Image (spheres, helix red, strand yellow):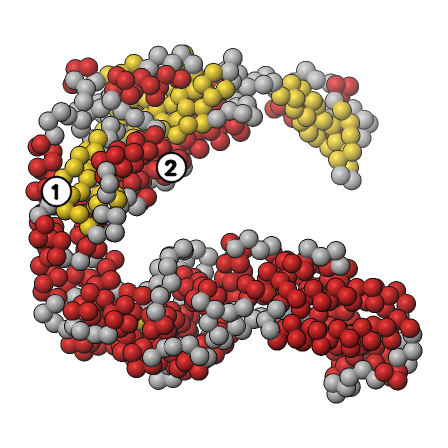
Amino acid sequence: MNQTLLIELLTEELPPKALAKLGAAFASGIVNGLKSRDFLEEDSAATIHATPRRLAVSITKVRATSPDKSIREKVLPVSVALDKDGNPSAPLAKKLAALGFPDLTVADLERAQDGKAESFFYTYTAPGSQLLAGAQAALEESVAKLPIPKVMSYQRPDGSTVQFVRPAHSLIALHGGTVLPLTLLGLTASNVTEGHRFLTAPGGRSVTVATADAYAATLAEQGKVIPGVDARKEKIRASLLEKAGADQVLMPEALLDEVTALVEWPVVYECRFEEEFLAVPQECLILTMQTNQKYFALTDAAGKLRSRFLIVSNIATDTPQAIIGGNERVVRPRLSDAKFFFEQDKKKTLESRLPLLKNVVYHNKLGTQAERSERVTALAGAIAGKLNAAGLQADVALTERAARLSKADLLTDMVGEFPELQGIMGTYYARHDGEHEDVALAASEHYQPRFAGDALPATATGTAVALADKLETLVGIWAIGLAPTGDKDPFALRRHALGVLRMLIEKRLPLSISGLLADAARQFSSVAGFKDPSADVAAFMLDRLRGILRERGFTPNEIEAVVAQNPDRLDDIVQRLEAVQAFAALPESASLAGANKRITNILKKNEEALAQTGGAGVNPALLQDTAEKNLHAAIVRVQPEVDAAFAKGDFAGTLKTLAQLRDDVDAFFNDVMVMAEDVALRNNRLALLSSLHGMMNRVADISKLAA
């Protein structure tokens, strides 16, 4: 009979940062184990339960007995099973006995081809197994594969030593309302668990679960425990929003996840701190509340920090004053430390800290942070100059000043305490020092984008410094042999590459990748043994580019049509791809793409012949067949339209113009022999195809659409 299966393991408090992974792995391991043994239906559904003290899973429509199976067993090759006289051999009798069928005769066996030889087979029906055995195996397999951060050893009451992430106290295994006597970690399953440590009476903490389907409701009603991770998290989210009222609550998902893993019965209370602390940069206060105390900061509608904050407690009470007061007392010293660091840091300017960068090693093969700062400063100035030359406003002097000061806040007390504030504090301190606003903003903007979806630098100064910082890292780290491998990328080169690409694309910067990398490599001229890795870094960046474009919804063929041309500038790449999309939707596109692919192959095979012509164009006098004359005339007619559209940046118009050529291109390939015996005639036809190929592929390699 199909019923819901519940398995719960009750433990001491589990590591909160590992709880989500442990809960998911515990559930998926059991589900996969049961599925592989055929105990689940196609529409069986699993629900993950995980609290600070328990890992559990409930699975619907679990069979009590797995279905019978028809098994076709290979016995032995005929040449081994029968002797030279055709009688059953001793090995056959031994094999049948080993398989559990000692009484079978040769007549009972199936004789069939097995590759190049013949073998005997026996088909039989194996009865299904009981859920107890299947669930026991699935549970053991799941627990053995749990991603346990650190295993601990402990003694059971019987004196046996057990190893697990935390001491385990009880095990539940219910199929419907029937207890399955599974065993694990010295425990035998029952239908009894424990409720909340503090919200149930010590003598009445045990909770009996009548059926697997009643698990969550029973724990909530009798044990004051919400076992579902998602249910608990959403209750916390809703309670925070309710308590926040008109204010905005800052609740990053990582903090929500961690707090969810710390409580079984979440209750939100409001606390306050003294207004004087609001004089400290709010990022400092928010970070210390979130990181050290797991509190939720509040801001007004404009984003300004409020002096009240929210906590998530594991205790529900009508008199929470002691809880509130205790948390307010705990946070006060943290905020006082932040205020002290801020006041102390302001006593020294960022510029006065620069000499100390000579004492900070960046990498033993690349020198100190001071040397790195010099490279980034020179590179940022060069980039600002290029932006100016392209008509974009970028002050070279301000950019170099911003780059020079960009790492100075690493030497402040605040960033020493909270590394996550690097750049952010640089902006505050630069403003305090009276630096230009662009210089101050660049201190934080040059780290952008910090992650996928993060904002890009808003100012030209910040953009130039951000590009320089990331390019210097890419080229320098790659040059010393620390390119990303597999999932290892300790210097975040993938993130740096994505940041550079996003700035070039989204800001439509008219800068060449090769030029930027050459400028970056030039800054390492004084580094001993430096070998320019620009070619490898460029290929790496193009590979990352494919990923960015896929996320924007372009198809692999569309992307390859553009990226296969190894674009050096990316300011118009999205427009090129949109043009390719529009072209691909035309009824003529498939035929032209196929023809372009054919032309590409022909030209590739005849590169030497084309080279010998010295780039001579088409000689109209050598055109013989009507089809080639018509194609040449069409190319001459369409070329000015293509040139005009391309010059205006109308890539869609450029490609759509090519649609006029379809009939003439099709007729050419139907009627004309390109590889004529006459060398002059053949070379002229190759030149005709070469001119067509160049015109067709100005925007993208449309042959890739035929792939």
Q: Position of residue 211 (x, y in %)?
A: 38, 14
Where 460 falls versus 141 (above or below)? below
Q: Is residue 377 visible?
A: no
Q: Which residue: 41% across, 80% down?
A: 388
Q: Nearer the viewer, residue 186 or 691?
A: 691
Q: Which residue is mark 2?
A: 146
Type of amino acid under label 2 = Leu
Real-space Cα separation, disc 1 to disc 2, in angstroms: 41 Å
Q: Position of residue 133 (x, y in %)?
A: 46, 20
Residue 170 falls in which quadrant of the image?
top left
Q: Quadrant of the C terminus?
A: bottom right
SS of the residue under disc 2: loop
- Which disc, if any, is residue 272? 1
Whether residue 221 sits left or right of residue 349 in the image: it is: right
Q: Which residue: 87% across, 75% down?
A: 629
Query: How many residues crowd mark 1 within 10 Å: few (<14), some (14–19), many (20+)?
Result: some
Q: Position of residue 28 (x, y in %)?
A: 44, 33
Mark 1 or mark 2, earlier in chain: 2
Which of label 1 and label 2 is nearer to you?
1
Q: Is residue 347 visible?
A: yes
